[in-house]
Image: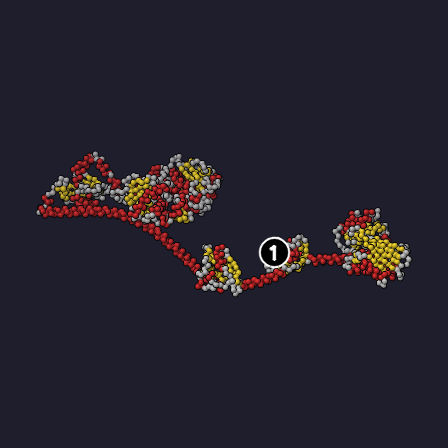
C-alpha cells in the first residue's frame, strides 16, 4: 500500500471497533501507513477512558458496539471538536444525532483507501 | 233620573259639563289616542273610568298626562273635590267614582269582583246629579256602560261610542250601541271633532233666549204632533225643553228657530226627537224597598182575594224596556210560590215607544243587571247567555207587551194592581189628574196603584187612599158611581164645552149697564126659561122657571128631561130633538099641567136654538108660556065622561111613554158604559193580537230554524247510515276477530272470526261472554275484561288455541264519542304465521349475530356522517371502547383514526362513493386507552346508507413483520461484518507459499463457519462451552480422544464469545499440530477450565491449555500472528486476558474471560 498523505503522518488515531480482528487489521494498516494509533477499544466506556488522557487527532468510530449505539461518544467528540469517521455495517440508517449526520460515513467492509481519504479530510492541518 | 230638574238655560256660574269616559280592555291605547287629539280648552271636565286590577297601582294618569296639556289626576282616597274645567280625573284601583252634589267622590268598591260595573255606576250618578253632559264609551270587553248610557241619555247627555271596527275590543262599544241610544259611532278622531261641536252648541244653548223658547217650543210640539200623532203639549215644559236641547246639540243647531226649521225639512228628525222624548230609564226593582212594600202590602192581599176574582190582572203603564214589568212578574211568581195559590196572572205592560217594547219583548238584558237583581232571582228567573241574562219563559209568558197611549187609548180594565211609575212627573197638573182618574177607572175596587217616588195621587183623595207614603202605594176607593172618566182625547167636544161652561154666569153677573137693566127687565117680564146644551143638560134657569121644574128622587142630575115636570117631558124632548137635529124652533100644543096650587093650567113650550157664534157650541133656549086655565074647549064640548075617559087614557099613555122614555135613557147610558168597556176589551184584544202576531212571526222563524235543523239532521242521518253501512261491511269483511262487550260483559257486537274462537252466534247477543265455551287456552277473559274496565289500562296477550294456533288478544276500554267508558273491545288477531316468521327471523338473526360475534372479526356500522352507530363485541374487545359510548353516539371513525391516517381513510371512503366497496386497506387506529393498533378493514355501503365494515386486528402480524425486517437488517449487518472479518483475516493471513496461505486462511474460515453453523443450530442464542470445544477439537480427537482431553463444568457462552473462543482454539490447535504436542505421536493436549465467582452476578471462566509430549519448545523470537490474534481477540472481544507460556514441555495458554 502506498504511503499515507502527510496529513496522516504521525496523526494520533483512536480506533473504536467491537470486532477485534477488524480493529487489529485496521490498526496494522494505519500504523503501516504512518499513523500513530493511540488506542483500540471495543466499548464507549473504554473510549472515554482514553479520551480523558489524550486527545486524538481523529477517531474511527464503529457505531454499533456490542449492540449499543455509540451516540454519546459521537456527541462528546463533536463537543470536543475531535473529528471522526463513522464506520457501520448497517445501511444508510437515519440517526437523530446531529453529530452523526455531519460525520463522514463508511460502510463495512471498509476500503482502506476511502478511510484514508476521509480521515485526511477531517483532520485539520497540523499546527 | 227623570225626577230631577235641571235649569235649561244655565247660569253664569254653572259647573262645567262632564265628559264621562268609560273604557276597559284595549282602552289605554284608545285613551292615549283620545287625549292626544282632543283640544285642551273645551271647558269640559273629563272623568275616566276604567276597569283596574285592585291589586296593582295604576299608571293610567301618567300615561294620559303624557298626551295632553290638561292636568291629569288620579282620584284616590282624596276627599270629594269640586270639578274643574279642562281637567282630567282618573279612577284609582279598587275605587268607584260618583258625582254627588257637584263634587267628585271616590269610594271603595262594594260589589264583589265579578259584578263590578264602575262605568255604569258613574254614568248613572252623572245622570242623576248633572243631567246633560257627554258619555264616551271606548274599547272594552263586556257590557259595562250599557246600563249607564240610557240614564245619561235620558238626562240629556250626548252619547258617543268608539267605532267597534276600530276598537281593540269591540264588545263594550257594541253593547252600548245595542241600547239604540247612541248619538255618534265613529273612530276616535271623528269622536273628538264631534265633542268639540257639541260643546260649541251647548255653549250657544246656554245663552238661549227664554222668549225664543216660549215661542219656538209650541211650534216644535205642533210639528211633532202632526208628524207622529203624539201630543206632548201636556208634558212638563222643562223636560221637553231638555230633550229638545239635546237634539239640538246633536244636530248642531244653536237656536230653537233653526232647529224648528230643520225639523220641518227633515221628517226623519221628528222620529229622532220622538225617540228622545220617549226615552225612559228603568231598572229591575228600581227603589228596591218600594217593591218590597208592594210585595208585602199589595200583592199578598191580591193573592188572598184572587180565588174569588178568578185571576189577577196587573197593568204596568209606561213599561219602557220592560224591567219593571218583569220585576212585577217575578214578585207575582214568588208570591204564588209562597202562598201556593194557583191563579192565572195576566200582566199588561204598555208603552208608547215601540223600540223599547221590542227590547222588552226580547227579555234579554246586559250582565250588569246583576247589580240590581239578587243572585237567587238571577238563578231562578234568568238564563245566562254569553254576556247577557235572558228572562225565563215562565216569567215572559205572564206579560203581554202592548203599544198603548195611556193618555189617549181606552184603558185596560179590572186590574188588581197598576204601576205607573215616572210617567206622571212628565205631565202637567191637569193631565196628571185626568190620568189618575183613568187609572182609578181601570182598577177594581180596592185595587192598588203604585207610583214613582217623586209622584203622588194625593190631589185626588176622593179616588185614592194612601197605603204607604215611601213606596207611593195607593188603594182605589169605592166610589158610589163608577162613572166613565172623560179624557180630553176621548171626546174633545166635551172638553171644550166644559171649559166654556163656567163663563156664562160671569157674563150675566157683570150686567150693571143699561143693557143689563134691559136684560133683567126682559127676564122679569119674559116667560120662565132655561138654557139646555146639546147633551140635554140643564145649564141655566131663569128665576121664575122653578115651577116647571121638579127634580126626581135619587141622584142629582142635570138631565133636563128628568128635571122638568113629568107632563112636559115628552114634548120638551121632542122639541129639543127638533131643535138640535133639525135646527128648527118648536112651539108645542098646550099641555095640561097642574101647578103647586093644584090649579090646572095650559102651558105651551117654545124651544129655539140660540145663535152664539161660529165656534161656540149650540144651546137651546126653552120658554114656558102660560096659556091660562083650561077652556071648555079643552074640556071638550062632547060628553064629559067620554072626555074624562079620553083624558085618563091619554094620561095613562103619557105615563107609559114616560116610563119607556126613562128606560130608554137608562139603556143608552148603559150602552155607553158598555161601549166604553168594549173599547177597552177591544184594546186588550188588539194588544194580545199584536203579541200573537209577534209570537207568530217568532214561531215562523223558529219553524224556519227547525226546517234548517231538520235538514241538517237529515244529512247527519245520511252520514250516520253511511257510517253504519261502512261499519257493517267492516265487521263482515275484517279478518280481525273483534268483540264488543258492555259493562256487564254482555256481547254487543262481534265480527265473524270471533265465532271461530267462541261458540257464539248472532242469536247470542246480549248474553254474557263468560257463559260460552271457547277454543282458547285461556280462562281469564272475564277477569281481564273487568280489570280493563276498572283500571282503563289496555291489556295485550298472546294466546294459544286448542288447535295450536297463536292469537294476539288486545283488550281495551270502549270509549263513546263523548268519552264515556261503555264496555270493553276485545280483538283477536291470528298471529300463527307471524309467530313462525318471527321465529325463523329470530333464528336467522341469531345465526347472523353469532357470525357477527366471532372473536376476531370486528364489525362496525357507521352512519353516513361517520358516526359509529353499532359494533360487535369483538370490536369492543379489540379496542376497549364501550357499548355506552356507541349508544351515546360519541365515536366517529375520524376520532379513532390517528391524524396521519385520516387522508388514507378519506380516500377509501371517496372510492366507496363510486364503487360501493370500502377497502380492503390497512391502517393504524386509536384504542380507547390512546394506544395504537393495526387494523385491516373491508366494508361496503348498505342500502340504508349506513356503512358496514369488517376489521381484523393485525397488530401482531405487523409486529412480526417489523421483527423480520429487523432480523434481515441484523443479518445483513452480520454478513457485512463477517465479510469484513474475512477480509481482515485474509489480509492478516500470510504465508511463504500460496499453499501455506490457503491452508492458514482456509483453516481460519472453516473455524469461523463451523462456529456459525453451531450458533445457527442454537438459534444464535447461546452455546455450551463443552460442546463448543468438542466441536472445535473433534478433528484432532477423531482417532484418539485421549490426545486432546477436554474437562470442565458446563457453562454457556454468548455467540460472540463462542466465535472468539473458536478462533482462539483454532489458532492454538493448528499451532499444536504444526509445532507443538500434536505434531508428534504421543503428544497430548489438555484443555480444562474452572468457573470462579467474581462479584454478585459475574462469573469468570479460566481456561487452561496445556501441551505435553511434543518437541521441545522455545519461545519464538517475534510474536506470530496466531499469538497476537489470541491475545487481541481475548482482550478486545472477550474483555479477558490471555497468557502464553512457552515451557519446554509444551505450550501453556491461560485465558480468563468474564461471563454472565
Crowding at dot 1, Cα within 10 Å, few <14 / some 14-19 / many 20+, comes out as: many
Nearer to me, B409 or B969: B969
Using the rendered image of the protein, determine whether residue B266 is visible from the camera's viewpoint.
no
The image shows residue B681 at horizontal and vertical percentages of 29, 48
The C terminus of chain B: image quadrant: bottom right
Q: Which residue is mark 1?
A: B869
Q: Is residue B818 visible?
A: yes
Q: Is residue B236 left or right of residue B1140?
A: left
Classify B611 as above or below B744.
Answer: above
Lateral position of residue B627 relative to residue B290, left or right: left
Res B210 quadrant in image: top left
Q: Look at 50% across and 55% down and name the residue there.
A: B793
Q: Chain of mark 1?
A: B
Residue B105's x, y, as percent?
Answer: 42, 37
Of residue B122 and residue B35, the one placed in the foreground of this image is B122
Residue located farthest toward the bottom when viewing the structure as drawn: B803
Q: Position of residue B757 (x, y in %)?
A: 49, 63
Q: As drawn, is B642 to the left or to the right of B491?
A: left
The N terminus of chain B, quarter of image: top left
Tally of numbered discs:
1
Q: Secondary structure at mark 1?
A: strand
Residue B20: x percent and y percent? 42, 40
Colour setup of the view: secondary structure
Q: Quadrant of residue B985?
A: bottom right
In the image, taking residue B1076 as reference, residue B214 lies left or right, namely left
- The residue located at (78%, 57%) in the rendering is B1022
Amino acid at each position: 500500500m502506498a504511503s499515507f498523505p502527510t496529513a496522516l503522518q504521525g496523526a494520533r488515531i483512536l480506533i473504536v471497533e467491537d470486532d477485534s480482528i477488524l480493529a487489529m487489521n485496521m490498526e496494522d494498516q494505519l500504523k503501516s501507513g504512518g499513523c500513530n494509533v493511540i488506542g483500540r477499544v471495543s466499548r464507549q466506556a473504554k473510549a472515554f477512558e482514553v479520551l480523558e488522557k489524550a486527545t486524538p487527532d481523529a477517531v474511527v468510530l464503529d457505531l454499533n458496539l456490542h449492540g449499543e449505539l455509540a451516540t454519546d461518544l459521537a456527541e462528546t467528540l463533536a463537543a470536543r471538536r475531535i473529528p471522526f469517521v463513522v464506520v457501520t455495517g448497517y445501511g444508510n440508517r437515519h440517526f437523530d444525532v446531529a453529530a452523526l449526520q455531519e460525520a463522514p460515513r463508511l460502510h463495512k467492509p471498509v476500503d482502506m483507501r476511502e478511510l484514508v481519504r476521509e480521515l485526511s479530510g477531517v483532520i485539520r492541518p497540523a499546527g | 233620573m227623570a225626577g230631577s230638574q235641571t235649569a235649561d238655560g244655565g247660569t253664569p256660574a254653572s259647573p262645567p259639563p262632564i265628559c264621562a269616559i268609560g273604557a276597559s280592555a284595549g282602552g289605554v291605547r284608545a285613551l292615549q289616542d283620545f287625549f292626544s287629539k282632543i283640544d285642551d280648552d273645551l271647558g269640559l271636565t273629563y272623568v275616566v273610568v276604567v276597569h283596574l286590577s285592585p291589586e296593582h297601582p295604576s299608571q293610567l294618569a301618567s300615561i294620559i298626562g303624557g298626551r295632553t296639556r290638561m292636568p291629569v289626576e288620579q282620584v284616590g282616597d282624596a276627599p270629594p273635590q269640586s270639578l274643574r274645567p279642562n281637567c282630567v280625573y282618573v279612577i284609582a284601583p279598587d275605587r268607584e267614582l260618583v258625582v254627588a252634589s257637584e263634587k267628585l267622590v271616590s269610594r271603595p268598591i262594594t260589589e264583589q269582583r265579578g259584578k263590578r260595573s264602575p262605568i255604569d255606576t258613574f254614568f248613572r250618578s252623572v245622570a242623576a246629579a248633572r243631567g246633560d253632559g257627554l258619555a264616551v264609551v271606548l274599547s272594552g270587553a263586556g257590557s259595562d256602560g250599557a246600563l249607564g248610557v240610557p240614564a245619561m241619555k235620558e238626562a240629556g247627555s250626548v252619547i258617543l261610542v268608539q267605532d267597534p271596527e276600530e276598537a281593540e275590543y269591540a264588545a263594550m262599544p257594541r253593547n252600548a250601541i245595542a241600547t239604540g241610544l247612541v248619538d255618534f259611532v265613529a273612530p276616535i278622531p271623528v269622536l273628538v271633532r264631534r265633542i268639540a261641536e257639541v260643546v260649541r252648541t251647548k255653549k250657544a244653548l246656554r245663552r238661549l233666549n227664554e222668549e225664543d223658547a216660549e215661542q219656538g217650543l209650541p211650534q216644535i210640539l205642533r210639528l211633532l204632533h202632526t208628524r207622529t200623532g203624539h201630543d206632548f203639549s201636556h208634558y212638563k215644559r222643562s223636560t221637553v225643553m231638555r230633550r229638545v236641547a239635546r237634539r239640538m246639540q246633536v244636530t248642531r243647531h244653536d237656536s230653537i228657530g233653526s232647529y224648528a226649521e230643520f225639523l220641518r225639512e227633515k221628517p226623519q228628525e221628528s222620529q229622532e226627537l220622538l225617540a228622545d222624548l220617549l226615552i225612559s230609564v228603568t231598572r229591575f226593582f228600581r227603589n228596591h224597598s218600594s217593591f218590597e212594600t208592594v210585595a208585602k202590602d199589595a200583592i199578598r192581599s191580591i193573592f188572598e182575594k184572587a180565588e174569588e176574582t178568578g185571576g189577577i190582572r196587573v197593568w204596568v203603564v209606561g213599561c219602557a224596556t220592560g224591567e219593571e214589568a218583569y220585576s212585577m212578574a217575578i214578585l207575582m211568581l214568588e208570591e204564588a210560590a209562597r202562598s201556593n195559590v194557583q191563579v192565572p196572572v195576566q200582566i199588561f205592560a204598555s208603552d208608547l215607544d215601540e223600540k223599547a217594547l221590542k227590547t222588552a219583548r226580547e227579555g234579554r238584558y246586559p250582565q250588569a243587571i246583576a247589580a240590581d237583581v239578587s243572585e237567587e232571582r238571577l238563578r231562578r228567573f234568568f238564563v245566562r247567555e254569553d254576556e247577557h241574562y235572558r228572562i225565563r219563559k215562565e216569567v215572559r209568558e205572564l206579560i203581554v207587551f202592548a203599544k198603548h197611549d195611556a193618555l189617549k187609548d181606552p184603558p185596560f180594565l179590572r186590574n188588581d194592581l197598576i204601576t205607573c211609575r215616572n210617567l206622571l212627573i212628565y205631565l202637567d197638573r191637569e193631565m196628571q189628574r185626568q190620568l189618575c182618574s183613568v187609572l182609578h177607572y181601570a182598577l177594581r175596587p180596592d185595587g192598588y196603584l203604585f207610583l214613582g217616588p217623586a209622584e203622588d195621587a194625593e190631589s185626588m183623595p176622593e179616588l185614592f187612599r194612601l197605603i204607604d207614603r215611601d213606596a207611593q202605594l195607593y188603594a182605589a176607593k169605592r166610589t158610589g158611581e163608577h162613572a166613565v172618566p172623560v179624557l180630553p182625547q176621548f171626546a174633545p167636544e166635551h172638553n171644550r164645552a166644559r171649559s166654556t161652561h163656567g163663563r156664562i154666569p160671569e157674563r150675566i153677573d157683570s150686567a150693571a149697564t143699561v143693557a143689563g137693566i134691559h136684560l133683567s127687565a126682559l127676564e122679569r117680564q119674559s116667560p120662565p126659561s132655561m138654557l139646555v146644551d146639546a147633551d140635554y143638560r140643564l145649564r141655566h134657569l131663569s128665576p121664575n122657571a122653578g115651577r116647571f121644574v121638579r127634580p126626581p128622587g135619587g141622584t142629582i142630575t142635570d138631565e133636563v128631561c128628568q128635571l122638568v115636570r113629568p107632563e112636559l117631558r115628552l114634548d120638551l124632548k121632542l122639541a129639543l130633538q127638533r131643535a138640535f137635529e133639525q135646527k128648527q124652533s118648536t112651539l108645542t100644543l098646550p099641555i095640561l099641567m097642574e101647578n103647586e096650587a093644584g090649579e090646572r093650567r095650559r102651558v105651551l113650550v117654545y124651544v129655539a136654538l140660540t145663535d152664539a157664534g161660529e165656534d161656540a157650541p149650540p144651546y137651546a133656549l126653552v120658554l114656558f108660556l102660560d096659556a091660562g086655565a083650561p077652556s071648555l074647549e079643552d074640556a071638550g064640548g062632547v060628553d064629559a065622561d067620554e072626555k074624562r075617559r079620553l083624558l085618563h087614557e091619554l094620561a095613562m099613555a103619557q105615563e107609559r111613554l114616560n116610563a119607556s122614555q126613562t128606560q130608554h135613557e137608562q139603556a143608552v147610558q148603559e150602552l155607553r158604559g158598555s161601549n166604553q168597556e168594549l173599547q177597552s176589551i177591544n184594546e186588550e184584544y188588539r194588544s194580545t193580537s199584536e203579541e200573537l202576531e209577534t209570537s207568530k212571526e217568532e214561531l215562523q222563524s223558529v219553524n224556519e230554524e227547525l226546517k234548517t235543523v231538520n235538514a241538517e239532521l237529515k244529512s247527519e242521518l245520511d252520514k250516520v247510515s253511511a257510517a253504519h253501512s261502512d261499519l257493517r261491511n267492516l265487521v263482515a269483511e275484517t279478518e280481525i276477530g273483534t268483540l264488543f262487550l258492555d259493562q256487564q260483559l254482555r256481547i254487543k257486537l262481534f265480527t265473524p272470526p270471533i265465532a271461530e274462537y267462541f261458540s257464539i252466534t248472532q242469536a247470542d247477543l246480549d248474553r254474557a261472554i263468560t257463559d260460552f265455551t271457547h277454543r282458547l287456552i285461556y280462562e281469564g277473559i272475564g277477569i281481564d275484561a273487568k280489570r280493563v274496565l276498572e283500571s282503563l289500562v289496555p291489556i295485550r296477550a298472546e294466546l294459544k288455541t286448542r288447535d295450536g294456533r297463536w292469537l294476539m288478544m288486545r283488550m281495551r276500554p270502549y270509549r263513546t264519542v263523548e268519552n264515556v267508558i261503555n264496555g270493553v273491545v276485545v280483538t283477536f288477531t291470528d298471529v300463527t304465521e307471524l309467530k313462525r316468521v318471527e321465529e325463523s327471523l329470530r333464528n336467522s338473526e341469531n345465526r347472523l349475530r353469532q357470525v357477527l360475534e366471532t372473536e376476531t372479526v370486528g364489525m362496525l356500522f357507521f352512519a353516513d356522517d361517520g358516526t359509529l352507530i353499532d359494533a360487535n363485541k369483538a370490536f369492543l374487545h379489540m379496542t376497549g371502547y364501550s357499548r355506552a359510548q356507541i349508544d351515546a353516539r360519541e365515536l366517529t371513525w375520524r376520532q379513532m383514526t390517528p391524524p396521519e391516517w385520516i387522508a388514507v381513510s378519506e380516500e377509501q371512503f371517496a372510492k366507496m362513493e363510486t364503487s360501493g366497496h370500502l377497502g380492503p386497506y390497512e391502517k393504524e387506529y386509536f384504542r380507547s386507552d390512546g394506544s395504537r393498533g393495526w387494523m385491516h378493514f373491508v366494508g361496503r355501503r348498505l342500502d340504508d346508507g349506513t356503512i358496514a365494515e369488517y376489521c381484523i386486528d393485525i397488530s401482531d402480524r405487523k409486529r412480526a413483520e417489523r421483527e423480520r425486517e429487523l432480523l434481515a437488517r441484523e443479518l445483513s449487518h452480520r454478513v457485512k461484518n463477517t465479510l469484513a472479518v474475512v477480509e481482515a483475516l485474509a489480509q492478516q493471513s500470510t504465508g511463504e507459499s500460496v499453499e501455506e496461505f490457503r491452508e492458514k486462511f482456509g483453516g481460519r474460515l472453516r473455524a469461523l463457519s463451523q462456529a456459525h453453523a453451531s450458533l445457527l443450530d442454537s438459534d444464535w442464542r447461546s452455546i455450551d462451552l463443552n460442546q463448543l470445544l468438542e466441536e472445535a477439537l473433534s478433528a484432532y480427537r477423531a482417532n484418539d480422544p485421549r490426545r486432546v482431553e477436554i474437562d470442565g463444568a458446563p457453562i454457556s457462552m454468548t455467540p460472540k464469545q463462542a466465535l472468539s473462543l473458536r478462533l482462539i482454539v483454532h489458532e492454538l490447535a493448528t499451532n499444536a499440530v504444526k509445532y507443538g504436542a500434536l505434531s508428534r505421536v504421543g503428544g497430548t493436549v489438555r484443555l480444562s477450565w474452572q468457573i470462579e465467582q467474581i462479584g454478585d452476578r459475574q462469573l469468570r471462566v479460566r481456561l487452561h491449555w496445556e501441551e505435553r509430549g511434543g518437541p521441545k519448545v522455545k519461545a519464538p523470537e517475534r510474536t506470530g500472528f496466531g499469538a497476537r490474534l489470541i491475545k487481541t481477540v481475548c482482550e478486545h472481544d472477550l474483555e479477558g486476558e490471555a497468557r502464553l507460556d512457552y515451557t519446554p514441555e509444551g505450550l501453556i495458554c491461560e485465558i480468563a474471560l468474564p461471563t454472565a
